[in-house]
Amino acid sequence: MAILVSLVIAGCGGHLTSSHSAPVTTPSPIASITVACTPTNVAIGGVSQCSASVQGSGSYSSAVTWTASAGTINASGLFTAPASAGNVTVTAVSTQDTAISGAATVTVQLATPPSKHVILVMEENQNYSTVAGNTAAWPNLNRLIGNGALATNYYANSHPSIGNYFMLTTGQLLTTDDGSTAVWDVDNIARRMLAAGIPFKVYAEGITQGYLGGDTGLYLIRHNPFAMLSDVASNPQIANATLWPFSQFAKDAANDALPQFSFIVPDVDDDAHNGTPQQADSWLQTNVVNLLSNDPAFQPGGDGLLIIDFDEALESDTTHGGGHVVAAFWGPVVQPGYVQSSTTVYQHESMLRTIMEALQLANPPGNAAAAPSMAEFFVQK
């Protein structure tokens, strides 16, 4: 019987074996998609044009659909950044084979708003802890900070003063000799402004128009780096157009004639170097803030930017080279009441970078090229 069953099975021609063959898969003609976006870094609300390169073999469609992890992107690949900073993934998916896609990253950065009214006032030799929150010594400045913004993690670069002033204008220390009056032929913000046709003036107490001499009275040349940069110091015509006694500031402010960038140098009694903090605070309020308060650029909707920066802390504080100091911003482009929320360490090269961004000058010189921007302190539009 067993033999008979075996013979029957054998004679049936393999009825116990499946006759179904494996399914045939047709390879996709789309091999890959490469995505590129230009520029790769944009400001909040900025745009970047993205393109997709579809690779494959035979006959295939190069059409893609676009998506972005934040912000928006249209059918043509034009990406519009969202209202917050961070990395955004832009993805292109093949319309012919949705299993094939490519992606690129666009970095959305905070932006320093452009301004045609940037004013930098320099103060001297005060520790952060003796200025910020000290309403007895600095009542007006602290009120200004309350209406503006404060960098809590800002440090000078060196002791003594002169290197800090050069860092603010060239992105380099250049020298730590406070007695030096050497003229430096290096890349600097004055050179960039002159090349771009941006008007600027230095308003310094104790000098006459075009003054290129050394210390006189309560004026110290080391507090006026523009007088030691070759673009100004080696050209009397430019010096005459850019170096002014401080009395000219009130006249220019009253006549709506302030330049796009103003660098204010109080004398050593009015910048807290020799005089008291109360004297410096009162001088700042009376001679700068009160005048700007009536300037249309500093009214809502204006683009005015006032910066109060301390060159260095007391010499006992050498943190990051020159110690912890106050840097404050005020004006309609500044976030009102903002206190630094990031942990970023800022120094004078960051201030130089930020000022140049406000003036829309690219590629800042020296250490400012790689320094973090202080854009977090500004209103983002």
Image (tube, grey):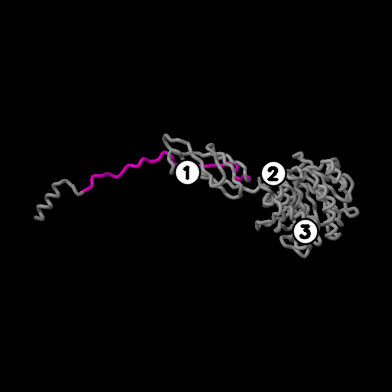
Q: Residue 293: x and y, percent? A: 80, 48
Of label 1 and label 2, which has the lower sequence position?
1
For label 2, the residue is 362
Question: Residue 258, relative to residue 219: is it above or below?
Answer: above
For label 3, the residue is 312
Residue 320 forms part of the magenta stretch: no
Helix, strand or loop at mark 2: loop
Q: Residue 289: x and y, percent? A: 81, 50
Q: Residue at x 85, y 49 (%)?
A: 204
Residue 39 forms part of the magenta stretch: yes
- Mark 3–mark 1 CB contact (< 8 Å): no
Residue 144 visible in the picture: yes
Q: Amino acid at mark 2?
A: Ala
Give how far apart the Cα atoms at labels 1 and 2 are: 35 Å
Helix, strand or loop at mark 1: strand
Q: Nearer the viewer, residue 179 or 292?
A: 292
Of label 3 and label 2, which has the lower sequence position?
3
Q: Nearer the viewer, residue 264 or 142?
A: 142
Of label 3 and label 1, which has the lower sequence position?
1
In the image: residue 50, left or right of residue 282: left
Q: Amino acid at mark 3?
A: Glu
Which picture quadrant has residue 209? top right
- Mark 1–mark 2 CB contact (< 8 Å): no
- Figure quadrant of the N terminus: bottom left
- Figure quadrant of the C terminus: top right
For label 1, the residue is 101
Q: Residue 120: x and y, percent? A: 78, 50
Circle 3 Cα neighbour tier, 10 Å, few/some/many (<14 / 14–19 / ≥20): many
Q: Residue at x 48, y 36 (%)?
A: 63
